[in-house]
Image (cartoon, rainbow, N blue to C red):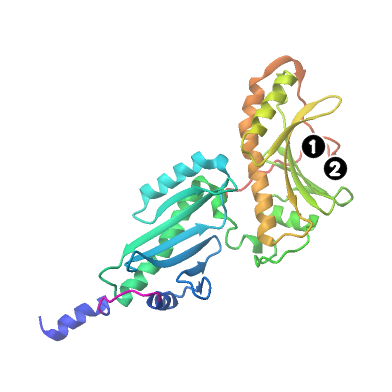
Amino acid sequence: MCNSCENKSLSRFGDDARPVTLTRIMGALREVGIDFHVEGSESDILVVEFSRFTVLIALDGAYGQLFSLKAVPKVNVHSSRAADLAFAVSESNNRLLWPASSFTEKEDGYLEVAITIRYELRAGLSDMQLEDMIDISMCSVQTALEILSEHVPELAGVPDGFTERFGESNTGTLVPVTLERVQRVLAAEGIENVEMEPEEQAIYAFINGYYFVFRMDGRRWMSVRAYFDSDTAKFNYGELLQVLNDFNAGEHESMAHAASSDDHIGIALEQHFLVDRGMSAGQIGCAIHGAIFGHLDAISELEPVVKHLAREDTEIERPYLDFDWEDEADPEQLETPDN
């Protein structure tokens, strides 16, 4: 092969391999179109912000011979989900060549996920190799997060474009929480058959066949409540209270209690959010989404236990409280969309 032909065949490999520095990494990030900033004025860590996770890039090792990339999702996971998260991490590590996924427990009891890539640089990289490695690393992190989110959906955080679906930009700006904002978020979740009562500062809805109330409790709190029962189940009231006590002793975001009146007993689930300083689009979207699916998860756990307490003495009736639908027919029962 002549030299000119050999040079042409080798041109696709780019320039020669040479030592990798932070300056070269910054240049490669610019080449592949990724914005970044340096963490602190004298830091040797590059930070890349994505909508769902933050990426930290550094050179590790005694002589900077290791490329280190660590991606941290912006949503931490409640410790009650440790088993699900462990399975998700194992699944991601089993399916992907890289990166490596793991999690640690933080001081507040929540679990922080880390998605890491480490690459040997002792022999250097060409510019094209460095750009390819960064590009593939970012794509691999996103793939790993998608796999993790299949089993632990809250890791997905605020989906791209979700806040725009209810007419707001996810800029982080805090805005007063109103019933109108709550209604728009519900519509973005596919829940449009709702009843809004401004005088009661509440929105009523049936979601997956269960009764939900979204209420502004003064200017300080927003509450999301769900109610369920079993129409034909009969149980011992004391045993029911023990079941609810055991549930609340666990690590759940929903609080459960008995909702009773003169002629019926039901089970209520509640989550409350402090809103007196407003909420950003991402905050209100995550709060409502998380409360809905948190309550549905809690119901799926509690309802079979309640049915198991069947007795002959007390019958549960559906706890509609004081809410009356305009027509006598049962309201349309909406199925929440897959998320």
| Label 2: element kind | loop
According to the picture, the residue beneath numbered tag 2 turns out to be: 326
Percent position (x, y) of residue 320?
80, 35
Percent position (x, y) of residue 14?
27, 78
According to the picture, the residue beneath numbered tag 1 turns out to be: 329
Residue 248, relative to residue 36: is it above or below? above
Q: The disc labelled 1 sits on which kind of residue?
A: Ala
Crowding around mark 2 (Cα neighbors within 10 Å: few <14, some 14 to 19, many 20+) is: few
Q: The disc labelled 2 sits on which kind of residue?
A: Glu
Query: Residue extending furthest bottom?
Result: 4
Q: Determine whether, in the image, residue 248 is placed left or right of residue 177.
A: left
Q: Residue at x 77, y 60 (%)?
A: 277
Q: Residue at x 65, y 23 (%)?
A: 307
Is 229 one of the magenta-colored residues? no
Quadrant position of the N terminus in the picture: bottom left
Q: Determine whether, in the image, residue 153 is placed left or right of residue 314.
A: left
Give the quadrant of residue 283.
Answer: bottom right
Crowding around mark 1 (Cα neighbors within 10 Å: few <14, some 14 to 19, many 20+) is: few
Is 17 one of the magenta-colored residues? yes
Residue 319, relative to residue 91: is it above or below? above
Residue 8 in view (yes/no): yes
In this picture, which residue range is highlighted in magenta? Answer: 16-22
Percent position (x, y) of residue 121?
30, 68
319 and 77: which is toward the camera? 77
